[in-house]
Amino acid sequence: MQNIVQKINKEAKIAVLCGGMSSEAEISRRSGKGCFAALQRLGYKNSELVEVDENIAQKLKEGKYDYAYTVLHGKYGEDGCIQGILEILKIPYTGCGVMASAICMNKEFTKRILSTCPDIPLAKSTFVQKGEDVMEKTRELQFPVFTKPVCEGSSFGMTKVNSKEELKAAYEEAIKYNDDVLIEEFIDGVFMTVGVLEQDGEAFATEILEIRTKHEWYDYESKYTPGMSEFILPAALDESQTKKVKEIAVKAHKTAGCNGFSRVDFMVGKNGIPYVIEINTSPGMTDTSDLPAQAKAMGISYDQLVQIILNGAGLNK
């Protein structure tokens, strides 16, 4: 890909926000170290790694940062909280704004918003709040299903449930993470994921990554342990299917109000329908993460990807 224009002054003081207080903190630190190293290589010598904790507002005020490069995953970092702090402090930041971050962190709200667009296929599902009768709420679903905490990432708390007899235990596992649980019909097909980037106000899809795991489904170990999954890039789709998946990814990104970049996850069923599973507004940036690999496949290096994301830093998103 052609050289990416550096829109941010190289003398700018940039806080690379990572870590945090969610179950995904360690993954965030790995992502943060990668982005920090890239910024240094790009010439942003005043960039600093900043660990996010309960004192983050004070750290940001005292640090007098010009920009925040957010590489946070999970609660407080990907749900609009840190974005709200940055808006109040008037520090331009990368990625999605408060509203889109909050919506996409919550699987229930994501599905409600995406359902307003008839061109975005979604798996049949229901939401169960703590105290509700899980058996009654799932009466119209076909098994197998997945139980998912509505506000967790990296497959934490997720269980594949093959029968009603297994449902209660899976539900109890999910509510350890959140009071609300998404229960979604299992799509028999292939897991695929698509990055969406923005440059000069235009959103475009990366190459599609197809993931074949050695486990029954794409769980935490499959995602973060080298050798546990096979990656096909670009995905084994014909030209028509590829175009369709990319178009739906960009529509989902826009419908949810995302900014800068995101990653849209799909299950492409054996019927050929690409069902949107979720939108990740702060995808991983480690050396084994999906988005950097997808970008590389279309000629965008890791450092160029970091620059594209930085160029999108702003406020009032």
Image (cartoon, rainbow, N blue to C red):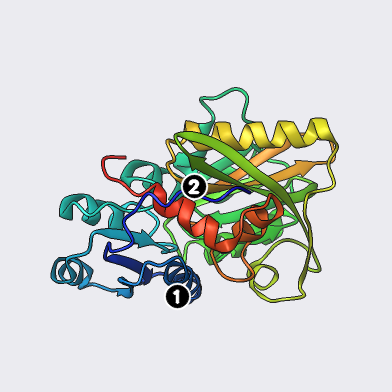
Q: Is residue 222 above or below residue 183?
A: below
Q: Residues within 10 Å of mark 1 (few under 14, many from 20)?
A: many
Q: In the rendered view, does 49 fall on the left or right side of 258?
A: left
The one of 243 and 221 positioned closer to us in this rendering: 243
Q: Residue at x 56, y 56 (%)?
A: 148
At label 2, the amino acid type is Phe
- Which label sits on residue 261? 2
Q: Is residue 287 above or below residue 274?
A: below
At label 1, the amino acid type is Arg
Mark 1 vs 2, N-terminal side? 1
The one of 132 and 60 positioned closer to us in this rendering: 60
Asked if residue 131 shows in the view, the reply is no
Circles 1 and 2: CB atoms closer than 8 Å: no
Q: Could you tell me residue 177's position as x and y percent? A: 45, 65
Q: Secondary structure at mark 2?
A: strand
Q: On the image, numbered disc 1 is attached to which residue?
A: 29
Q: In the rendered view, does 258 fall on the left or right side of 12?
A: right
Q: In the rendered view, does 148 fall on the left or right side of 109?
A: right
Q: Residue at x 70, y 57 (%)?
A: 161
The image quarter containing residue 316 is top left
Q: Residue at x 49, y 47 (%)?
A: 261
Q: Secondary structure at mark 1?
A: helix
Quadrant of the frame with the C terminus? top left
